[in-house]
Image (spheres, rainbow, N blue to C red):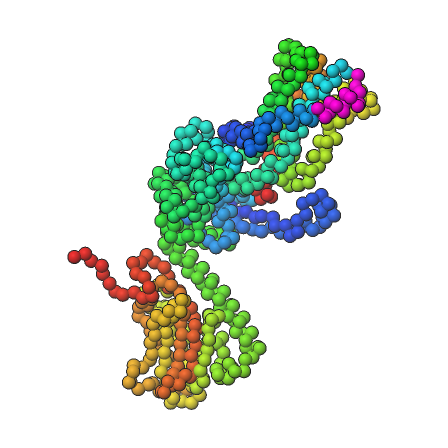
Amino acid sequence: MSAQYVINVQNVEKSFKVYLDKGTTLKEKVLFKKRARYESRQILNGIDFQIPPGQAVGLIGKNGCGKSTILKLLSRIYKPNHGELSVEGRVSSLIELGAGFHPDMSGKENIYINASIFGLTREEIDAKMDDIIRFSELEEFINNPVRTYSSGMYMRLAFAVAINVNADVLLIDEILAVGDVSFQKKCFDRLLEIKDGGTTIVIVSHDMDQLYKICDRFIWIEDGQVKEDGEPRLIGNHYLDSMEEARLERLAQESREKFSQIGQEGNPEEDASRGGHTILELTEYVHPEARRFGTQEVYYTKVELLNKDGEPCQIFSTGDEVVLRCGYAAREARIRVNFNMDFVRDNWQYCYGSCFAKAGEPLPELEEEGWVKFHIQELMLLPGKYYLDIGINGVNGELYDNVRNILQITVREYAHNEFGPCTFTHDWTLE
Amino acid sequence: MRRVRELLRYHEMIVNLVKRELRGRYKGSILGFMWTFINPLCQIIVYTIVFSLIVRSDLDKFYVYMITGMIPWLFFDNSIRMGSGCIRYQGDMVKKIYFPREVLPVATVTANFINMLFCFIIVFLVLFVSGVGISLKALFCLPLIMMVEYVMVLGFTLIISAGTVFFKDLEHIVNVLLMAWIYLTPILYPITSVPGKLSWIFKLNPMTYIIEAYHAVLYWKTVPTAVVMSRAIVAATVVLILGEFVFARLDDNFAEEL
C-alpha cells in the first residue's frame, strides 16, 4: 500500500445473492428447500482506482452500474468478495441523513445522537455544536422536539450534522437536494470549502453541472468496471454521448417495432399515398414519430446524417460540420424537382429550412436514381434536440415525398452565453 | 481485540443510544419515567398474589424471595426480547452508515441494565419494609453479580440479534422460550422444591447460578458460595465469547441481508 493514496481499490469484485423466491420463515425453509435458489449477481467486476489526498472524484454511470455499491464498500458497509480495498483516515458518508433521530427528543439531543453515530466523541460534538446549529439555521427551534419540525427543517438539521463532521474522506451519494434553493447553495458552498480544506471527496450524482463544479476527476463505471477515468469535461462528454446514443438506439428499436407492426396490419390508404415505400427502408435510426406523405413520383431511398469524418452520427456540437446525404429514385427520368430539408426543435418550433433551388431559378433535372447532398459547414443550432424533415417537391409544388421527424439530432450542452435555437457570431464589449 | 478497540472508539454512540432508549421510551406518556417502576411492580404484584396466596410456599416472606429473583430476571428477559430485533429494526441505519454493529446490542443491554439498577430501588424498599434488611458484607458481592449477569445477557443478545437478521422467526421463538425459561429458573419457587429427577435442567441453565447468587446476597444475606459464583462466571464468559464469535461471523452480511 503506497502512502501517496488515501483510497486504494484493487481488483475489487462484489456480487449479491438475489433470491428468486426467498422463504424466510421456518415453514418455508423446511417445506420449500429447493425454492431457496438464488442467483449471484455480479455488481462489480474488478474495479481498480487510486485516489490521492485532496482529490474530488465524481463517479458517473447509469443506474445500477455499481456506483452506490462502490460508496458502500468504501464506507465499510459492504465487504468485497474479492480484491483489496483500503481507505485511510476518518471516513464520513453523506449517504444517510438523520440516522438515529428520535422524534420526541429535542434538536440538540438529536445532534448528539446523530453525530455520535458518525463516530464523534462528546468533546468533538460540543466543540462543533454552535457551528452545526448556525448552519442549520434552527437557533429558535433547537430545543423543541424534532417531531414538531417541518420536513425541510428536519433535513437541514440532519445535513448540518453530516457536513460538520471533520473527515479525511467524505463520501456523498446524491443528496445535495436538501431544503430550499438558498440552503442548497449554502450546502454546496460548504462542500467547496471542505474540498479546499484538503478533504478527499468521492461523490455520486446525476447532476453533471454540480459534478463539474466540484470534481477534479471523473470515473465512469459501466457494467461493474471502470470504463473511463480522467478529466471531468472529457469523460463527462463521452458519458453523455454514450447515454444519448443508447437513447437513440432505444428509440430506433421502438420505431422498428412500431413501423413493422403497421406494415403487417396494412393500412391501404397510407400505403397507397406512399406508393408502398415505408419509412423503415430509409435509415436504421428512424424516430418513432416519423410520418411519410406524398405521391412517390420521386422518392427517397436512403437518408444518412454524417459527421466530418463521414461516419453516421446524430450527436453534434454547435459549429460542427454536418452532411445530410439522401438517396433518391424516380419513376421516370428527366423529371424536375426541388429537394428541401428543415430542422424543428423538440418543442415543435420551426428553426431552419433550406431547399435546393432558389426562387426563380430552374429546378434540377434528375436521373432515374442518385444521391443529393446537403453540406453544412458549421452547424449553427444551439444545444437541444431537433427533428430533421426532408421533402421532394415538383415544379408546381406537387408533394412527391415528404418525411417528417425522420431523425432526431442532439446538439451537446457546453458552457455558453447564448440561448434559443441558433447561434450568431458575436462579441460583447464595454464602451 | 481489534473489534473491542473499535467498539470503544464508538463509546459516545453507545452512551447516546442508551440515553435515547431510556428517555425516548416513555416520552409523551403521562407517567413518563415512572413506567420503569410501574411495569415490573405490576408483574411482581401479580406473581406475588398467585404464588403466595394461591400456590403456597413454605419459604418465609416468599414475596421477598420472588422479587429479588424477578428484577434480575426481567433484565435478562427484556434485553433478549428487545435485543432480538435491535439490528433488524434499525436496518436503515445499518445499511447506510458504518459503525461497529456490536453498538446496537450493547446499547440495548446497557439501557436495560440501567433500568434494572433503577428497579433495585424497589428491591431495597421491599427489603427494608418487610424487615428482611440487608447485610453489608453480602452486599459487596452485588456489583460483581450484576456485572456477571451483564456479560451473560450481552452474550445471549449478540447471538439472538445477529441470528434474527437471517432468520426472522427467531424473534418469536425466543419469546416462547423465555416464557418457559422463567419456570426452569428458581424464581417462582425455591430450588429445593425441584424434584431430583429434573434438577439436571436447572444445573444446565446458566441463569440458575446468577439468580441463586442474587438470592444468596439479598434474601439469605450471605456471600454466595464459590461453586455458584465460579459457575456463573464461567458460564457468562463462555456465552459472551460464543456470542461475539457468532456475531463477528455474521455481521459482514448484515447490510446485504436487511
User: Which quadrant of the view contains residue B41?
Assistant: top right
Is residue B149 visible from the viewing direction of this image?
A: yes
**What is the count of numbered marks?**
0
Q: Where residue A4 sits: x, y (%)?
A: 39, 39
Query: Considering the image in quadrants, where does the N terminus of chain A appear?
Result: top left
Please provide the residue range marked out in magenta.
B45-58
Query: Residue B51 versus residue B104: which sits nearer the camera?
Result: B51
Residue at 60% of width from left, 22% of height from top? B118
Q: Is residue B48 magenta?
A: yes
Question: In the current view of this chain or complex, which residue is farthest to the left?
Answer: A431
Q: Is A423 rendered above or below residue A98?
A: below
Q: Position of residue B158 (x, y in %)?
A: 62, 32
Which is nearer the eye, A348 or B154? Answer: A348
Relative to B123, does residue A274 appear above or below in the rendering? below
* Residue A11 coordinates in the image, percent (x, y): 50, 46
Give residue B69's quadrant in the image: top right
